[in-house]
Image: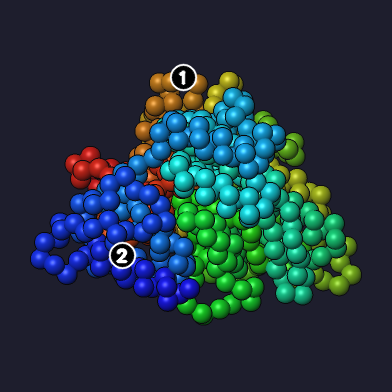
Amino acid sequence: MLARGLRSSLYLSMKHYPPHRSLNATRPAKYFSSVHTISNPTPRFHRFSGLQVALSVLISASLGFGTAVYLTDSPYLKSETPQFGSSDDIQNAISDLKKIFGAGSKVSTDPDDLHDHGFSANDHHPGMRHSVVVYPESTEDVVKIVNIATKYRVPITAYSGATSLEGHYRGHSTGGICVDMGNMDHIIEINEKDGDLVCQPGVRWMDINETLREKGIPLFFPIDPAPGATIGGMLSTGCSGTNAVRYGTAKGEWFLNVTVVLPSGEVIKTRQRSRKSSAGFDTTKLFIGAEGTLGIITEVTIRLAPVLPTTVAVVHFPNVQKATEAVMDVMQAGVGIQCVELVDDVFMSAINKFGMSKKVYPEKDSLFFKFQGPATIGSASPSASASLRETAEIVKKITEKHGGTGFRLARDANEADELWADRKNAHYAGLALVDGSKGWPTDVCVPVSKLPQLVYETKQDIKNAGLVSTIVGHVGDGNFHALILFKTDEEMERAKELVHRMVKRAIALDGTCTGEHGVGIGKKEYLIGELGEGTVQLMKTIKKTIDPLGIFNPGKLYPDDVTSSTQKTSKE
C-alpha cells in the first residue's frame, strides 16, 4: 500500500513538474487516473515548488494509496479556486443520500434543521444554510456520505457541539452537505489502568467526566472549553480552557490517536494506543486544529488524568499590571496551580449583579485561583489538605507583595464550587450588563509578560469606542477573552473594528489572533500577518494534497487569495 502510494505520488509529482523544457506541455488522456471522470483531460499544468512536490509524495505515502490516486483527478490542484458541483449535482447527491439512508431521520432537508446547522446565536459572522443535514451513526456511514460528496463535488461540513465562536460550521454559498455527528456520541472503551478512553467524536467532555465519576473511576479529561463542546469539535479547533495552565491544550498529548475518513473515502487510524510513539510523523496532530478541512473524525482515543483535590481562592488588585506580575511570581514558585483567571473590574461588577454565589466582591481587577494538590488522609474537606493550605499561604504572600488585597480562600467544597461558578458564569453575567444587548466574543493570546500592555490598551480602546465589554483572561498562559456588548448595527460595526485592532495588537506583541477559539471564517484574514506567507502556503499545500477537490469545510481556516495591497496584516 505504501509503495503504491509512493509510486502514484512520484508519478503525480513528475506530471506537475515535468523534466521537459516546456512546462506547459500537455499529455494524452491515458496518463490520467480513471478513478474519476474529468471534464478537461488535458489541462494546462501548474508548476509546483519543490516543497509542494515533496509534500505530495510524503503525505500521500503516509496517508495511503487512496489519496494518491484521488489526487490525480483534481481541478483544485490546477487552479486556486475549487470547482464545486452545480445545483443539479447537489440535488442528485441528496437523492443518493436518501436512497442509501432512507428518507427518515438520518437525512433532513427540513428548513428549520438547515437553518439551525448554518447559523449561530453565539457569534455574529454571516450565516449560511446547508442543502441537507445527514446524521451518521458509524464510520461506515461517514464513508458513504463522503463518497457521495466526492462523486458530485459537493461541499461537506462536519457539525457537533455547535459551541464554536468563529463560524466553523457555516454552510457554503453553493450549498452542501452538513454531517451532524450527534448520533456518534458513545464512549466505546474505558481503560482505567492505562489512563485512557476511546470514544466517538460527538460525546461531550462534560459527559465523559460525569460518566467516570458515576463509575467511581478517579480519572478525568482535563481539557475544559464551553460546557456543550464535543470531543470531535475540541480536537478540530485545537481548543483549551481554564485548565490549560496546568494541563496544556488540545495540541498537547491529550489526543492519542484518531480514526479519520479522508476526502478520498479512505479510513485511517493515525497510531496505536500506546502512551507515546516515535514511529514516523505525528499524523494525529495533522488533524488537530485543521477544523474539519482535512477529514472527518469518527473515533478518538483520549488520555485521562488523575482527579486531585482542589480548592478556590480570589484576590483583588489595583490594576492588571500588578495582578499579572503576581501570577508570574506564583508560577515561578512551583506551587500546585490548576487554574488562574484574570477578571477585570467590569466583570466583577457584572457578577455582583448577576453572579451565581450572591457574594459581593470589590469591583477591582481580580484573580481567581484554583489550587491543586494530593489528598491528605483523613482530611474532612479539600481545603483541609495540608498541600492545599501550604499552596494558599504561599500564593497569599506573593499576591500581597504585589498589592493584592482581600485574599479569600474557600472554607469548604461548596464555597469553592460557588466561587468558581461565578468565574464560569462570565458569558451570561456579562451579557446582563447592558439590557437587551448582544455580545461579540473573541480571544487573543500573547506572551504572559505582554498581557498587561495588551489588556490596558484594549480597555482604553473599548472606552474610546463608547462600548461596554468584560475582559476575562487565562492569565497563566497569556490568553484573554473579551465580550463586547452592542445593541445596534452601528455598534456592532464598532465592535467588529475593536476586535480587528485587538488582534493587530496581539500579533504585534508576538502573540496570536486566537488562543483557543480557532480560526473559522472570523480570524482567517490574520493568518498571513501572524504566521507568514510561507507557513500559510505550506498549510494550503497540505490541504490541496489531502483534499484536492477542496470540498471539506471550504471557506474556513485558510486565508483567501488576495493581493498584497489588500491583505490585512499586523503591519497595517
Residue ID at (24%, 61%): 16
Q: Position of residue 479 (x, y in %)?
A: 49, 52
Residue that badge 2 annotates: 12
**Which of the marked residues, 2 or 1, is nearer the chain's N terminus?**
2
Mark in the foreground, 2 or 1: 2
Residue 251 vertical position relative to residue 122 in the rendered view, above or below: below
> Tag 1: residue type?
Thr
Residue that badge 1 annotates: 488
Does residue 444 appear in this view? no
Q: Position of residue 266 (x, y in %)?
A: 52, 60
- Snapshot quadrant of residue 535: bottom left
Left or right: 419, with 518 as reference point: right
Residue 294 vertical position relative to residue 268 in the rendered view, above or below: above
Left or right: 544, with 115 as reference point: left
Residue 296 vertical position relative to residue 499 in the rendered view, above or below: below
Q: Position of residue 442 (x, y in %)?
A: 48, 41
Mark 2 lies on a secondary structure that is: helix
| Disc 1 residue crowd, few under 14, some 14–19, many 20+, Cα 10 Å | few
- Which quarter shows the C terminus? top left
Mark 1 lies on a secondary structure that is: loop
> Tag 2: residue type?
Leu
Residue ID at (70%, 35%): 105
28 or 282, which lies in front? Answer: 28
Residue ID at (63%, 50%): 141
Does residue 419 appear in this view? yes
- Snapshot quadrant of residue 375: bottom right
188 or 262, which lies in front? Answer: 262
- Snapshot quadrant of residue 492: top left
Residue ID at (47%, 68%): 64
